[in-house]
């Protein structure tokens, strides 16, 4: 038996029940114990244990068995982002409520400069992308993590998304929830690809899944998708099971989608054409007069209907807003005597949409920070909307200068 | 002039809330003004009061002052100012004359530091007073000695009893069994023994049989110390010092400073390689490990804080400090105190690898030598070169250049492993680490060629 194990056994049972047998100890320790007093079994045992512990500690060895080595990462071919750019990114990542639209803007700038992020920030960025709320910026994260980032994916399952064609893989092999998520992401990033996906598998999907995918179809809908929707509608009408609740629901959705397309036709412009910021917000020339869409929004808006208004605002999230409209929105979400808490509902969204706001809005915001009031709602507005927005404007300007 | 990193500033925060507020204040917009020169960083920030708060940071001997009413130390304003300086040094205006409120404070601090040194040099002024003090001291020491002797005898019986009846019943003994004995040792002014007895309560009795070995190892450590104390007179002088310190003698910092001489002080550029903070019964213990960049000497600086009082010594982990360290008398000098420090900004200084090891074997050989000098030695920092991470059966190891492996300590989190992987890309690096039992806990990556250090947190 291993000597230390024997000592442990004696220690556990006590020297009274199991006195130490010194013969099991290494000879060097036995030599040292020759002069020890055996008539005091406790001391004798403790001396042996003390020697044995030192003997073991001094003789500890590293393992020399064969273990599989990790293949090192490939060398990077692109340069790291500038130190200034890194300062901005670190600031964005360290904020408690991470500002995804600004991080996204930062990543766009990084990509435009052909930069990648340095290794010491990789884990933070990979973790950010693993969060479901950041799924719409995953395509950008993929492009800035470099070879090192791709290499890192093997060590954490949550970072699988950073592999190329992750959504394609989910769409083909994933469970239904994963497929749904992949579809939502691709509909956001590459609407026509999502359309191709759906067309290809439409015949094989269950009615329930068809419904779910169609629900996500509203985003980024375009004129080219009308024929397909008409076909779906015709097939449903001809279906003898049309009376089934699920089929009725699908028909309802298809009709809603077709109406959206009608509307698009009237305005003679597709969302696909309008979407995306061509360059940084402040470089873009935006007319200060309101567009038809903006007028329509203001005509219909009910600020007390938080959820509905949030949804509608979000739909305008791909546009650069005119100066007048920007200010009308900010005034609209300002709390007053009748709407104490509405700032809670609007603050997160308006911050995410900060890049939509017209640069001239800064004047209005600055005016508010400079005015003082003891009014609780006013201060909430200042604290939760106005100051953070001004901070976001600063950051946008910083990123544009990179 | 980038003197410190965000990571280092983060380490100065007294708690998570202050850290968050500090980061929020790291926004140039929130500051009325901020300036810096070589010795001091200062700024004014609008708080809830009418006048802006005046915040200043002594950059040489890291210290803070702020006119805000916060009892946190450093307060969020000081942290915010340092964060701005760390993130974006170019944002801070330099070359502006210090206003009076800044130069008053900083000059006072410099004078105080200088007069302290002066005072240390002229202490024995009144011979009569000194004689009486010496007598009192001797008397106190004698009384203490008797108390400790009684405590040692008592613990000796207690331990023998434990060994005779067996350790198997330890898990059932309960917290108070050990706490009571520890309290007796505190009464006997043997706080070191008290802490060792308390360590029985830290053993995890519900994790298989691992506690068997831990409990026996702890018992033998106590036994060895008791025996050493009983035979104190027979031991060489420096051994006696170690035993007394282990038993629980406290050496006052001022006494140690007064006795500082060429043999127990080292002036060097010290790299603060890591820190561990523990809180126990309202007392926060901060362990700072340092490495002398020229001397290759390792050092441990302990700082203590009671409840919410601030740590007196503000060392920034990961920073290089020009400092004189005074080592406690010991057979293997390790624990030390700071005599004077200033931030090292000369990054062109060379770095000595005297304290570095090429393989695990070489490290172990040195460790064995240290054990021969101090058998209680544990949790010691080392630098080992050319290490690479390896994974085998879901367990992480570090492989040395000879192909031998030591397992990572379980305190090194997944996140830290990922961080280390990201930075190294799977290639070998030089690491400062803590050897604890037969595992290693990496502290940071040393780049010897350009003398930079990256903490792993």
Image (cartoon, helix red, strand yellow):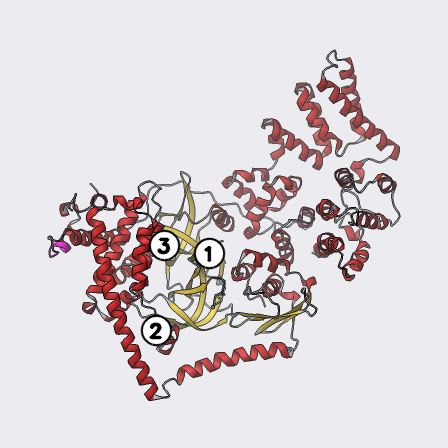
Closer to the camera in the image, B281 or B39: B281
Q: For mark 2, what is the residue? A: B264
In the image, residue A328 lies in the stretch drawn in magenta: no
Please give left or right for residue A101 compared with residue A62 in the image.
Answer: right
Could you tell me if the residues under marks 2 and 1 are in contact, i.e. CB atoms within 8 Å? no
On the same chain, marks 3 and 1? The answer is: yes
Residue that extends furthest to the top in the rendered view of this protein: A240
Q: Which residue is mark 3?
A: B435
Give the CA separation, mark 2 to mark 1: 29 Å
Q: Earlier in the sequence, mark 2 or mark 1?
A: 2
Q: Position of residue B445 (x, y in %)?
A: 46, 56
Residue B221 pos. (x, y %)? 26, 56
Q: Secondary structure at mark 1?
A: strand
Mark sitting earlier along the chain (3/1): 3
Q: CA distance from mark 3 to mark 2?
A: 25 Å
Give the class, few, some or many, for how many residues have Cα within 10 Å of label 2's Cα (few <14, many ≥20).
Answer: some
The residue that label 1 is drawn on is: B445
Q: Is residue B401 visible?
A: no
**Mark 1 falls within which chain?**
B
Q: Crowdedness of circle 3 by 10 Å Cα count: few (<14), some, many (20+)?
A: many
Residue at horizontal 43 percent and vertical 47 percent from the top: B389
Identified at 31% across, 53% down, the residue is: B178
Circles 3 and 2 on the same chain = yes
Magenta extent: A31-37
Q: Name the N-terminal-most of marks 3 and 2.
A: 2
Chain to which the residue tagged by mark 2 belongs: B
Q: Quadrant of residue B353?
A: bottom left
Element under disc 3: strand
Residue toward you, A187 or A392: A392
**Frontmost residue, A84 versus A28:** A28
């Amino acid at each position: 038996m291993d000597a230390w194990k024997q000592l442990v056994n004696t220690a556990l049972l006590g020297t009274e029940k199991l006195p130490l047998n010194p013969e099991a100890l290494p000879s060097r320790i036995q030599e040292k114990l020759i002069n020890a007093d055996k008539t005091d079994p406790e001391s004798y045992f403790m001396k042996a244990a003390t020697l044995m512990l030192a003997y073991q500690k001094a003789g500890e060895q590293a393992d020399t068995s064969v273990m599989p080595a990790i293949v090192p990462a490939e060398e990077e071919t692109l340069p790291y982002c500038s130190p200034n750019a890194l300062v901005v990114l670190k600031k964005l990542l360290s904020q408690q409520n991470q500002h995804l639209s600004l991080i996204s803007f930062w990543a766009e700038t990084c990509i435009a400069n052909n930069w990648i992020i340095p290794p010491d920030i990789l884990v933070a960025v990979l973790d950010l992308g693993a969060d479901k709320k950041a799924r719409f910026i995953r395509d950008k994260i993929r492009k800035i993590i470099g070879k090192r980032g791709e290499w890192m994916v093997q060590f954490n399952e949550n970072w699988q998304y950073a592999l190329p064609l992750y959504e394609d893989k989910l769409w083909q092999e994933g469970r239904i929830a994963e497929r749904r998520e992949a579809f939502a992401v691709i509909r956001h990033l590459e609407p026509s690809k999502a359309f191709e996906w759906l067309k290809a598998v439409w015949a094989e999907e269950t009615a329930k899944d068809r419904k779910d995918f169609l629900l996500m179809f509203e985003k980024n809908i375009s004129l080219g998708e009308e024929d397909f929707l008409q076909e779906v509608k015709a097939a449903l009408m001809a279906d003898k099971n049309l009376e089934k609740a699920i089929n009725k629901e699908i028909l309802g959705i298809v009709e809603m989608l077709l109406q959206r397309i009608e509307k698009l036709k009237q305005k003679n412009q597709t969302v696909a054409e309008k979407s995306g910021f061509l360059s940084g917000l402040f470089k873009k020339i935006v007319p200060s007069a309101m567009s038809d869409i903006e007028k329509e929004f203001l005509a219909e808006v009910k600020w007390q209907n938080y959820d509905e208004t949030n949804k509608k605002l979000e739909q305008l999230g791909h546009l650069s807003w005119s100066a007048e409209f920007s200010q009308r929105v900010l005034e609209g979400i300002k709390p007053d005597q009748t709407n104490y808490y509405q700032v809670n509902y609007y603050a997160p969204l308006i911050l995410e949409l900060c890049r939509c706001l017209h640069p001239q809005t800064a004047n209005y915001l600055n005016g508010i920070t400079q005015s003082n009031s003891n009014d609780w709602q006013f201060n909430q507005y200042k604290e939760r909307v106005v100051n953070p927005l001004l901070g976001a404007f600063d950051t946008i300007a910083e990123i544009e200068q990179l | 002039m980038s003197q410190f990193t965000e990571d280092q500033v983060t380490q100065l925060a007294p708690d998570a809330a202050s850290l968050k507020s500090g980061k929020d204040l790291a926004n140039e917009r929130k500051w009325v003004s901020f300036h810096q020169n070589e010795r001091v960083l200062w700024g004014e920030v609008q708080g809830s009061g009418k006048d802006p708060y005046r915040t200043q940071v002594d950059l040489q001997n890291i210290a803070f002052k702020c006119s805000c009413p916060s009892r946190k130390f450093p307060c969020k304003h000081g942290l915010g100012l340092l964060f701005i300086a760390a993130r974006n040094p170019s944002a801070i205006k330099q070359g502006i004359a210090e206003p009076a409120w800044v130069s008053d404070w900083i000059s006072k601090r410099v004078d105080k530091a200088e007069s302290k040194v002066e005072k240390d040099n002229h202490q024995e002024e009144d011979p009569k007073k000194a004689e009486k003090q010496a007598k009192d001291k001797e008397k106190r020491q004698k009384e203490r000695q008797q108390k400790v002797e009684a405590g040692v005898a008592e613990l000796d019986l207690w331990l023998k009893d434990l060994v005779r009846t067996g350790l198997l019943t330890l898990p059932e003994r309960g917290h108070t069994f050990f706490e009571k004995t520890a309290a007796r040792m505190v009464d006997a002014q043997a706080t070191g023994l008290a802490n060792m007895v308390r360590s029985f309560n830290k053993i995890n009795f519900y994790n298989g049989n691992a506690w068997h070995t831990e409990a026996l190892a702890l018992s033998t450590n106590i036994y060895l110390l008791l025996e050493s104390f009983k035979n104190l007179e027979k031991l060489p002088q420096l051994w006696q010092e170690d035993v007394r310190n282990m038993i629980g003698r406290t050496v006052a910092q001022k006494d140690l400073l007064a006795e500082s001489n060429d043999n127990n002080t080292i002036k060097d550029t010290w790299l603060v390689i890591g820190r561990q903070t523990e809180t126990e019964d309202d007392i926060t213990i901060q362990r700072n490990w340092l490495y002398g960049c020229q001397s290759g000497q390792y050092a441990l600086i302990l700082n203590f804080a009671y409840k919410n009082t601030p740590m007196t010594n503000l060392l920034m982990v990961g920073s290089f400090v020009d400092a004189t360290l005074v080592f406690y008398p010991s057979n293997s000098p390790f624990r030390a105190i700071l005599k004077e420090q200033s931030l090292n900004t000369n990054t062109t200084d060379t770095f000595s690898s005297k304290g570095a090891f090429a393989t695990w074997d070489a490290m172990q050989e040195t460790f064995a030598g240290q054990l021969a000098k101090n058998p209680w030695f544990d949790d010691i920092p080392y630098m080992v070169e050319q290490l690479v991470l390896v994974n085998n059966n879901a367990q992480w190891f570090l492989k040395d250049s000879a192909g031998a492996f030591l397992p990572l300590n379980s305190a090194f989190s997944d996140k830290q492993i990922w961080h280390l992987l990201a930075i190294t890309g799977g290639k070998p690096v030089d690491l400062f680490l803590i050897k604890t039992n037969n595992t290693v806990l990496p502290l940071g990556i040393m780049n010897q060629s350009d003398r930079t250090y990256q903490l792993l947190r």
